[in-house]
Amino acid sequence: MLEIARIRSEKTAIIEGLKKRNIDASLTIDSILELDMKWRNSKTDLERYAAELNQLAKSIGILMKEGKQEEANTTKEQTAALKAKENELKIAVDDFEKQITQLLYTLPNVPNELVKAGANETENETVVTSGEIPTFNFSPLAHWDLAKKFDLIDFELGVKVTGAGFPFYKGKGAKLQRALITFFLDEAEKSGYEEFIPPLVVNEASGIGTGQLPDKEGQMYHCTIDDFYLIPTAEVPLTNIYRDTILPSEDFSIKLTGYTPCFRREAGSYGKDVRGLNRLHQFDKVEIVRIEHPSNTAKALEEMLEHVKNLLEKLELPYRILRLCGGDTGFASAMTYDFEVYSGAQEKWLEVSSCSRFDTFQSNRLKLRFKGEDKKTQLCHTLNGSALALPRIVAAILENHQSEDGIKIPKALQKYTGFDIIN
RNA sequence: GGAGAGUUGGCAGAGUGGUCGAUUGCGGCGGUCUUGAAAACCGUUGUACCGAGAGGUACCGGGGGUUCGAAUCCCUCACUCUCCGCCA
């Protein structure tokens, strides 16, 4: 959520920035500012009445104590009219506030200056391309065929037991999952991230804190009896650790990581894009989260990119990094880099990681602040990224590293899998 | 699942209708003393919002109510703890 104070002071810059998302926010912002003006005026009035009433109540107390019953009663009568006024204003103030919040919820984050204008994914900029696109002297199989051939993943069994998008991993397939998770966590630890194993369900306040609620509840599984939500990403519990927090100094850099299964309803399109591991309702992911001083955000994002690059290089996968254009950048993000790996058999790029800086957009809702030198509280910046999401990495490993002898396990992963080939 | 007790400032813990945004202790910060530190002593120490400022308003788990006035009374919801039961 954008800060109201920022809208007051940087109105034109915000409108210009949002144009990069193909959004004309000028009407919304004008309404917000108009409501804000009304809200402040009503609030000032309200507080004046409240002060007067407090004063009267106090004096009644004193009169009673002094035994001046009659004077006290006369004073009581004065309060009735003021109270009516106060009530009226209270309702108005609440109403303005609600309207403002409603409108603020509709505004996405303002893109960073590096983000280019653009309507959709076709206008993203490729900033890095690395690694060899694999070539085969045989006809390569897609990962769903490989998974069947080597008995690694059973999609049909998942359908039987749960439903589409909930596969079983078996044997070496399961072992590969476990190896990747441990590998990713070890690498995160090497980069200075502290590991957490968080709850997999969260309450409503946490969903609101990271922005899944109130608008996107359809994307999460909801346990209605207890009013819990299954997490769509570890970002939710990890970031919410710091909800309603004021860090005591401005000298901080918080780096968290966690492995969790992720649950997403995403009732979306069907067909080739969602085949096999390409899109699942439950998948595994190691997430990295950072909470930073605003002056360190740019550097932190760079470090996250380096970290993910390193993972992909160790897995010997060809990848490219895209800086998303305005129209493709997520609602809460100020800037997002997507990592895509090339899938040798499907012959397309698969998104495996998304690293974003949210600046104060999340921390404003989370009430995550720090105390500056001047003792003033300021909002922290939050960032997060996948490092990495498993299913498409598994798909890419299976497809890119297939050979006539079987699937070769990248060297860096072998000590985790305990085998160097699947055949 | 049954029974009971709670929820107050960074923490501990007072406060049962009026000058209580809240006694006190610990912790934190500043100072005196000291070569330095400890101890002792003195002072200070919540958040948000409105206001140009003076100042004001709100917040004692959340929401609602009674009252001129609520941390204190009533209703309701949530959470925590203890005991019993069940259980990995």
Image (cartoon, coloured by chain):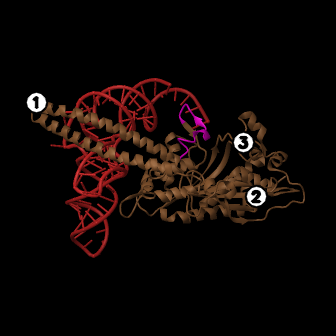
Residue at 25% across / 41% down in the picture? A49
> Circle 1 sits on which residue?
A70
Question: Relative to B61, does residue A294 appear above or below in the rendering?
Answer: below
Q: Earlier in the sequence, mark 2 or mark 1?
A: 1
Name the residue that disc number 3 marks.
A269
3 or 1: tag closer to the N-terminus: 1
Residue at figure coordinates x 55%, y 52% from the top left: A24
The one of B20 and A354 positioned closer to us in this rendering:
A354
Return the chain for callout 2: A
- Percent x, y of residue A212: 55, 44
Tags 3 and 1 on a common chain? yes
Residue type (three-letter) at the residue carrying disc 3: Ser
Please provide percent x and percent y for residue A45.
29, 44
> The residue under label 1 is which amino acid type?
Glu
Residue found at x 37% / y 45% = A39
Which chain comes out brown in the rendered image? A
Provide the chain ID for the residue under circle 3: A
**Tag 3's secondary structure?**
loop
Q: Amino acid at mark 2?
A: Tyr
Span highlighted in magenta in the image: A211-227
* Residue where numbered disc 2 is placed: A342
Image quadrant in which you'd find residue A421: bottom right
